Amino acid sequence: MMHNPYLPYPVDVRKITLENEAKDIKTFELVFQDDADRERFAFRCGQFAELSVLGAGECPIGIASSPMETEYVEFTVKKAGVVTSALHDLEEEVSIGVRGPYGNGFPMEELEGSNVVIVAGGFAFTTLRSLTNYILHPDNRHRFGELTVIYGARTPGELIYKYDLEAWAQRKDLQLHVTVDTEHEGWDGLVGFVPTILSQVAPSPGNAFAVVCGPPIMIKFSLPVLAQLSFPASRILNSLEMRMKCGIGKCGRCNIGDKYVCKDGPVFTVDELQHLPQEY
Ligand SMILES: Cc1cc2nc3c(=O)[nH]c(=O)nc-3n(C[C@H](O)[C@H](O)[C@H](O)COP(=O)(O)OP(=O)(O)OC[C@H]3O[C@@H](n4cnc5c(N)ncnc54)[C@H](O)[C@@H]3O)c2cc1C
Ligand code: FES
């Protein structure tokens, strides 16, 4: 029988990790109750899902774990309103719903064989963390070129995935540049906004893709730096966070011009975005 696309898969919340000092970002490790559902939920980096909490509703959240992780899926959620607060109130071992995976995700076939430059700010790092861990997986690393990750947050306490950052810092097959906006006691890493660090690191555009996710102000100032470094607009990828409802191209809630962000996106090249009406 065909699966009803509006019907969420039941999942158990196996682990909840508080990610930041402000205590408003948590990562949820979810395990599918039925193995067949996990198989149906085959996803690629950059896709998202609708998470649902009974009595609160559902909301779109990017998939934060790597597709190589088959036992569980992870989502990192910032407390923003009704549904995200209900998620934050959950305890481990309860059940919620997951609908998806949705969206186009990153063009992995094109990224393979290329150098990848990841530019991320704040909690929008989620799907890029998925991409980074996917590339770093022993089965995949040889299929990609150089990997550069530039990631920043306002303060050291707001950096998420510190456990990954520590593990990545030990690796020789990844150039990691972690920065915070201003000086902080006890922080001896980079200090400066992401676009500034990006221009200092100056990654080469040769055979490279840049993937940029973050707050609008970070994107606004990072794109001209990438242009200055001669990254073509067709090789800069950006993931949009429009308001959504159905997630499957039915309700018309997320469209920009003739594109549905939930179906045609959320990942677009800057070149594609330049040809869309400025409604995002
Ligand atoms: C493709 C996609 C991927 C996303 N990935 C993540 C993620 O990985 N982690 C995460 O924490 N959030 C993510 N978001 C944003 C998340 O969907 C919203 O924060 C969530 O829908 C808010 O729901 P709520 O019921 O808690 O808030 P509501 O009660 O509906 O609204 C609370 C506030 O949040 C604003 N808001 C609601 N929806 C959005 C939205 N889509 N974008 C921006 N502001 C919104 C409202 O204007 C209001 O100010 C993603 C959104 C999209 C479209
Ligand atoms: S969210 Fe319904 S069409 Fe995109």
Image (cartoon, rainbow, N blue to C red):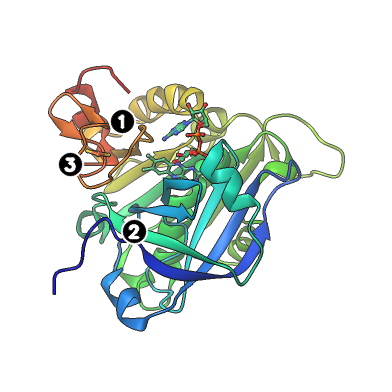
Is residue 166 shown left or right of residue 196? right
Q: As drawn, which residue projects farthest toward the right?
A: 185
- Towards the viewer: 174 or 279: 279
Residue behind mark 3:
250
Q: Which numbered circle lies on residue 99?
A: 2
Q: Quadrant of residue 180?
A: top right
Could you tell me the amino acid type at mark 1? Ser
Q: Position of residue 105 (x, y in %)?
A: 28, 52
- Towards the viewer: 186 or 38: 38
- Residue 261 appearing in the image: yes
Could you tell me the amino acid type at mark 2? Arg
- Residue 160 appearing in the image: no
Relative to 70, say whether 6 is above or below.
above
Q: Is mark 3 within 8 Å of ligand 2?
A: yes
Task: Please tell me which residue is depicted at 67% across the width and 43% down the height of the picture.
Answer: 24
Quarter placement of the C terminus: top left
Task: Please tell me which residue is depicted at 69% across the width and 42% down the height of the picture.
Answer: 158
Q: As drawn, which residue projects farthest toward the top?
A: 278
Of the image marks 2 and 3, the number of the one nearer the N terminus: 2
Relative to 197, say whether 115 is above or below.
below
Q: Secondary structure at mark 2?
A: strand
Q: Position of residue 44 (x, y in %)?
A: 30, 61
Q: Which numbered circle lies on residue 230?
A: 1
Quarter placement of the N terminus: bottom left
Of the image marks 1 and 3, the number of the one nearer the N terminus: 1
From the image, state whether disc 1 or disc 3 is nearer to you: 3
Is residue 38 shown left or right of residue 61? left
Q: Position of residue 94 (x, y in %)?
A: 58, 68
Decide: marks 2, 1 in contact (CB < 8 A)?
A: no
Could you tell me the amino acid type at mark 3? Lys
